[in-house]
Image (tube, grey):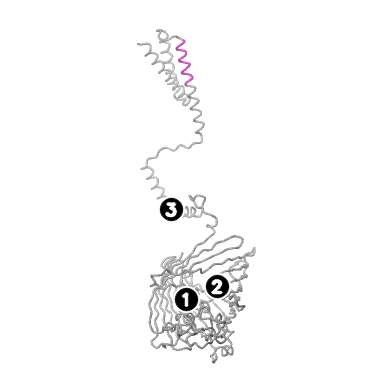
Amino acid sequence: MHRTTLLFRAACVALLLGQALTASAASSQEEKTLNELRNTVVNLLQGLVDRGVLTREQAEQMVRDAQAKADASAAAAAAQEKAEESAVRVPYVPQIVKDEIRRQVAADLGKEVTDSVVETAKSESWGVPAALPDWVKRMRWYGDVRVRSQGDFFATDNSTNSYLDFQRVNDAGGIGKAGASALVNTTEERERLRYRFRTGFESVLGYGWSMGARLATGSLRDPISTNQTMGNWAFRSQIGLDLAYLDWSGTTSTGRHTFGVTGGRMRNPFFTGSDLVYDQDLTFEGVDAYLRMGLDRNDPTGRAVFFNVGAFPLQELELSSDDKWLFGGQAGLDWKYGSGSRTRLAASLYRFQNISGQRNLFESGLLDYTAPLFLSRGNTLFDIRNDNDSSTNLYALAADYELANVSLIHDWRIGAAHRMTFAADYVRNIGYDGKKVLARTGFFVPRRDVGYQAELAIGSASMAHAHAWRASVGYRYVERDAVLDAFTDSDFRLGGTDVKGYTAGFDYSLTPMVMGRIKYLSGNEIDGPPLGINVLQLDITASF
């Protein structure tokens, strides 16, 4: 055997010796095997020295080299082991095993556990980088869409050419200028599709402060309806700012008493039993202060008295000090019974300032501003124009309005799932002065200043779940000058006063957020020429 070959084999043996020495440092169980291997290598080297293939110095050097390499490998292994002490080693798991584990876990987890985890993830914003901005989390968005099919059906004995559309007359500048549109339709029945869209938000600002805003469809000239009639495909719908308010409220340490102030364009701040005085879609501009005082120490929200006072500008005039205002005050009682029934009763006084018209001097338009910005139908009016042009007219209110109103709602709990509700409103215009009306109009007008409305409903205790239902019947009686025709309900006999009749309705929740409604409203005149209108509405409303 050649010397070179023997040297190569000796080097290989030395390498094996180094690896064996490193392995021995890692595992004591192989110590016996390593000793046998070490002895074999030593004997082999000794044999090579004896045959003269290697000198003793060469053999000893090979052993030293092997030992140094083994020490270096052992030190590197020890350093790597120390660096990986905190590492978690994950063994490879085949996909088929992963799928089986996932199926088994899903089967073992109950629905309640899964729902709980999902709800926690939502509330704590799992997986959302930096979660959400604080101002977003303080906001609550809401809205609704209503689609309505409406039929307007007229009595066969209705008077023709007797009722003026005073809003169109005023907009046109007179009866002659308005032409055929000056008259109200009293004979041609109408069927139409309508819709309403509203969306808004409320935001808590801290330290008792909050704010809110809402957009809504509807004519920008009509304060009491957010409906948009379909069939006007060439033009987009109008959307206006329906709410924009800032509110501050504070509560005593016991939670029994609450005081607050709201400013801007707000929801009706007064408790009402119906839409006798104010339409449900009417919003108020101004400032309102409220106070609620709890009477039960053990239940701060159970029994209380409440108060509201507010000032609301109706028309601000730049060149006059006769701005039109509504001033309102209310005191009420909220009483909850141990059975779950509840009674709310309130007395209110609403005073409209500078609301009546003033007749112009001859050939002057200086007092045109005293005409209202919006009119419906029913109130006593007179022409404030004073000129020789018979085609010009401008109509304004002949009476003053100071409304004394009493509202009542009582809920009876009928078991755990149902309730019966009785709601009632009574109003009288105590500000009506027959002498002033005579002076303004030039003719005697019988006093008609009383209105009332009552409704009885029965159904589910809450409409916020699928298959909930509610049925109702009601009666309405509103004399000519009992309330402002521009602010009262816009659906009953298509709005206005000088009307009496009944209503019937049925509500049904298709889902917790989608409700269907059918409502029938039948109204007739009290004093005026015959005018009977029956209105049938079919609604689907979705809200969030």
Dot 2 corresponds to which residue? 284
Q: Position of residue 305 (x, y in %)?
A: 61, 73
C-alpha separation, residue under disc 2 versus residue under disc 1: 28 Å
In terms of secondary structure, where does tag 2 sit? strand
The residue drawn where x is 50% and y is 73% is 281
Dot 1 corresponds to which residue? 457
Dot 3 corresponds to which residue? 110
C-alpha separation, residue under disc 1 versus residue under disc 3: 42 Å
Q: Amino acid at mark 1?
A: Ala
Residue 38 position (above or below residue 123): above
Q: Position of residue 491 (x, y in %)?
A: 45, 78
Q: Amino acid at mark 3?
A: Gly
Residues in magenta? Answer: 57-69
How packed is label 2: few (under 14 Cα within 10 Å), some, or many (20 or more)?
many
How packed is label 1: few (under 14 Cα within 10 Å), some, or many (20 or more)?
some
Q: Amino acid at mark 2?
A: Phe
Closer to the N terminus: mark 2 or mark 1? 2
Quadrant location of the N terminus in the rendered image: top left
Q: Quadrant of residue 287?
A: bottom right
C-alpha separation, residue under disc 2 versus residue under disc 3: 51 Å
Q: Quadrant of residue 442?
A: bottom right
Closer to the observer: label 2 or label 1? 2
Which residue is more in the foreground, 529 or 503? 529
Magenta stretch: dominant secondary structure:
helix
Q: Position of residue 356 (x, y in %)?
A: 57, 83
In terms of secondary structure, where does tag 1 sit? strand
Which residue is more in the foreground, 130 or 68? 130
The residue drawn where x is 54% and y is 57% is 135
Closer to the N terminus: mark 1 or mark 3? 3
Q: Contact (CB < 8 A) between labels 1 and 3?
A: no
Closer to the N terminus: mark 2 or mark 3? 3
